[in-house]
Amino acid sequence: MSAAPSFHADPLIWGHGPRLFEVFLEPTCPFSVRAFAKLDDTLHAAGPERITLKIHLHSQPWHMYSGVITRAVLAASTLPAGKEAAKTLLAAIAAHRAAFEFEHHCAGPNMSASPNEIIARLEAHSGLPLAAAFATPGLDREVKRHTRYARQNGIHASPTFMVDGLVQNDMSSGDDVATWVARLTA
């Protein structure tokens, strides 16, 4: 029997309404970044009493540091600010994508970066103390939970959107907030 984890990863959930809007994001994906930028406005416009927004992290191997960055976001969710720290980190990654991504997914200055350097960059851009949280034993269970949930729901790419448990293949990061809100409040 394994011991309970010595940390708490705050679920990435905002709002408390009956309509469930789930978004699967890879933090360095340009389309996920575009979707992430619309989430607060969508929640505000739809109303947190009408929808519940859940972010699930969906690591993708062609984004070369995806695993490290996904774990760092989940590590941020274990900090005292919980999900708000994770959101702060996601915003910092979105604002500084070039610091964490490869050119054409295979080249550029990040070829020489180590995971420790990536974590240091994440700390510098977000102002969050991530290194110790990143090294938390058992945090991989949280990473696996996000991965397992995506696989169970047939999620293959990011961003992917689900409404009330159903994948919305016709929803896109290119849609405007008003389009999302209309769909969520219909």
Image (spheres, rainbow, N blue to C red):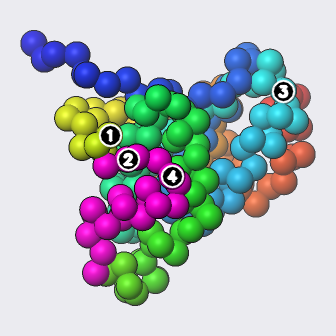
**Residue 152 visible to an observer of this rendering:** no
- Mark 1: give few (<14), some (14-19) or many (20+) Cα within 10 Å: some
Position above or below: 43 against 57 = above
Mark 1 or mark 3, which is nearer to you? 1
Q: CA distance from mark 2 to mark 3?
A: 32 Å
**Magenta stretch, residue numbers:** 112-131
Amino acid type of the residue that numbered disc 4 sits on in the rendered structure: Gly
Mark 4 or mark 1, which is nearer to you? 4
Amino acid type of the residue that numbered disc 1 sits on in the rendered structure: Ala
Instruction: Answer whether residue 177 is magenta in the image.
Output: no
Q: Which residue is mark 1?
A: 133
Q: Name which residue lies at 43% across and 56% down.
A: 123
Identify the mark nearer the N-term, 4 or 3. Answer: 3
Q: CA distance from mark 4 to mark 1?
A: 14 Å
Q: Which residue is mark 3?
A: 47
User: Circles 4 and 2: CB distance less than 8 Å?
Assistant: no
Q: Which residue is mark 4?
A: 127
User: Circles 4 and 1: CB distance less than 8 Å?
Assistant: no
User: Circles 2 and 1: CB distance less than 8 Å?
Assistant: yes
Position above or below: 80 against 90 = above
Between 85 and 184, the residue placed more toward the observer is 85
Amino acid type of the residue that numbered disc 3 sits on in the rendered structure: Gly
Residue with the most extreme left position: 1
Q: CA distance from mark 2 to mark 1?
A: 5 Å
Q: Which residue is mark 2?
A: 130
Residue with the most extreme bottom position: 108
